[in-house]
Amino acid sequence: MTKITAAITGVHGWVPDYVLTNKELETMVETNDEWITSRTGIKERRILKGENQGTSVIGTQAVKGLLEKTGNKAEDIDLLICATTTPDMLFPATANVISNNVGAVNAFSYDLQAACSGFIFALSTASQFIETGKYKKVIVVGADKMSSIIDYEDRQTCIIFGDGGGAVLLEPDTEGYGIKDSILHTDGSGEQFLHMKAGGSRKPASPETLIAKEHYVYQEGSQVFKFAVTNMAEVAADIMAKNNLVSDDVAWLVPHQANKRIIDATAKRMGVSSDKVMLNIHKYGNTTSGTIPLCLWEYEKQMKKGDNIILAAFGGGFTWGSVYIKWAYDSK
Ligand code: UT7
């Protein structure tokens, strides 16, 4: 029997208009453009403003654009998975909201939460539904409105995160293109260094949790950095070794955009030169589940059919992993 792989056959991204620059952050917290640029590589990030604007706004725009550019009808989508850490509401799933907004009436939808590794966890999950032969058109969304859980008085976190996201379409391929392999990891002991304390079932929202600012991201940055820099580099190198790839075989590294220094360390460990590394952290900061699809969207025209592409991410949980893709199309 012919082996079915899940090929990405289209990608689209969306970011809100409002640009929060390092200069503006200087007026909000004790920081400066030089520190942010040299320690993270970030110059600006996008913020979704306005009442009743949740992550589904980002996801909906990305999916609408994806359907339009790939010439697909919303009712032909079988499944939509949304990777997000900032759902519109605890329930129902933001994926359901997006499916409803775009008219994907025949799709079943659900959210997947793996913090900054969310997109690659969702991509790996979605690929199984295609590989079994059961479904033909699956959309994976990675989107976050991080500004909704950031304390703009905390200079450790507010300089890093931004809002945005993207979506890819997966379809069956029988010529060996698409998602070839994935390695995913979690280590729940990482919770202590990166989490949001309240608003879940362990500590529901109350006047006390609000006063204690427990509805914001808590991050011990330098601890997370140490784990991220080691594990993201390690897992990217592991997937190369497992698939007998040497650095010359890799056309693109698509790293989660959390910190330019983590990205550089990953590329170095893989032996991949900087011209093969997709980068947009300077424009968007860390959009959590959004970073990788936003990169794929912005670099779409530069990728060629047959390119070996390595995705790599690290995030809260801890979660981390890598996906190896043989790119399936030349974009027009
Ligand atoms: O995406 C999910 C996973 N998250 C990550 O991967 C994030 C990983 N962590 C990081 O990217 C970095 O740890 C940060 C960007 C968060 C912080 O950079 P760092 O180089 O680890 O800085 P640090 O926390 O070790 O702080 C160094 C110094 C401190 O001052 P002293 O104690 O040396 O006087 C901080 O108080 O920099 C100070 N500092 C700042 N100064 C200006 C911390 N934040 C700022 C700031 N502006 N925004």
Image (spheres, grey):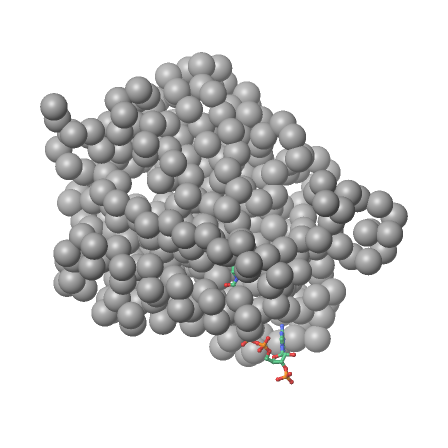
In the rendering, at what x and y percent does residue 151 appear?
Answer: 71, 59
Ligand 1 visible in quadrant = bottom right
| Closer to the camera in the image, 237 or 140 | 237
Q: Quadrant of the N terminus?
A: top left
Q: Is residue 12 left or right of residue 148?
A: left
Please determine whether, in this image, residue 292 is positioned above or below residue 139. below
Q: How many marks?
A: 0
In the rendering, at what x and y percent does residue 228 appear?
Answer: 45, 65
Which residue: 39% across, 45% down? 120
Q: Is residue 308 left or right of residue 103?
A: left
The quadrant in which residue 89 appears is top right
The quadrant in which residue 157 appears is bottom right
In the rendering, at what x and y percent does residue 305 appear?
Answer: 17, 43
Which residue: 55% across, 78% down? 34
Q: Quadrant of the C terminus?
A: top left
Please determine whether, in this image, residue 172 is positioned above or below residue 73. below
Q: Is residue 178 visible?
A: yes
| Closer to the camera in the image, 235 or 327 | 235
Q: Is residue 95 left or right of residue 48?
A: left
Which residue: 62% across, 61% down? 192
Please determine whether, in this image, residue 223 is positioned above or below residue 218. below
| Closer to the camera in the image, 29 or 111 | 111
| Closer to the camera in the image, 148 or 119 | 119
Which residue: 48% across, 61% down? 258
In the rendering, at what x and y percent does residue 206 appear?
Answer: 84, 45
Q: Is residue 46 visible?
A: no
